[in-house]
Image (cartoon, rainbow, N blue to C red):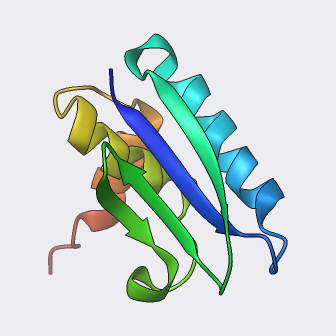
Amino acid sequence: MPRIAIEYCTQCRWLLRASWMAQELLTTFGTDIGEVALIPGEGGVFRITVDGDQVWERKTDGGFPDIAVLKQRVRDRIDPARDLGHIDRGHAANSETPSG
C-alpha cells in the first residue's frame, strides 16, 4: 500500500495546512493508501512524497498545491486509471483552448 508523507515547517506553523491536505487525501483515496504521515520539519519545508517520490515541493513548485492538483499527482502515482470525478472534468475543461 502506498505511503504518503507530508513534511511541513513547524516554525512556519503549517501543521493545519498539512493535516487538512492529509484529511483530503484520506477522504479521496480511503483504503487504497496505507498511510499518510505528517513529518515536522524546519526552514520553510513543505514537501509531499508518495513512497519516497516527491510529488510536491513548495520552493520548487511555487507555493502550496491546489488540492485538486495534489490529488491528481497522487492519483497519477498510485492509480493512474482512477477517475477523480469533478476534479478531472474541471481540469479537462480548464485546459481546453477555445477555437477561433
Can you see residue 69? no
Relative height, residue 42 to residue 54 (above, below): below
Q: Nearer the viewer, residue 86 or 68?
A: 68
Relative side of 25 to 10, left or right: left
- Residue 43 coordinates in the image, percent (x, y): 65, 87
State the quadrant of the N terminus. top left
- Residue 54 coordinates in the image, percent (x, y): 32, 61
Residue at position x 58%, y 61% in the image = 7
Relative height, residue 29 to residue 23 (above, below): above
Quarter-of-image position of residue 44? bottom right
Can you see residue 66? yes
State the quadrant of the C terminus. bottom left
Q: Nearer the viewer, residue 51 or 62?
A: 51
Quarter-of-image position of residue 9? bottom right
Residue at position x 45%, y 36% in the image = 86
- Residue 16 coordinates in the image, percent (x, y): 82, 55
Relative height, residue 67 to residue 97 (above, below): above
Relative side of 24 to 30, left or right: right
Residue at position x 40%, y 29% in the image = 85
- Residue 31 coordinates in the image, percent (x, y): 46, 12
Relative side of 39 to 16, left or right: left
Quarter-of-image position of residue 91? bottom left
Residue at position x 25%, y 33% in the image = 78
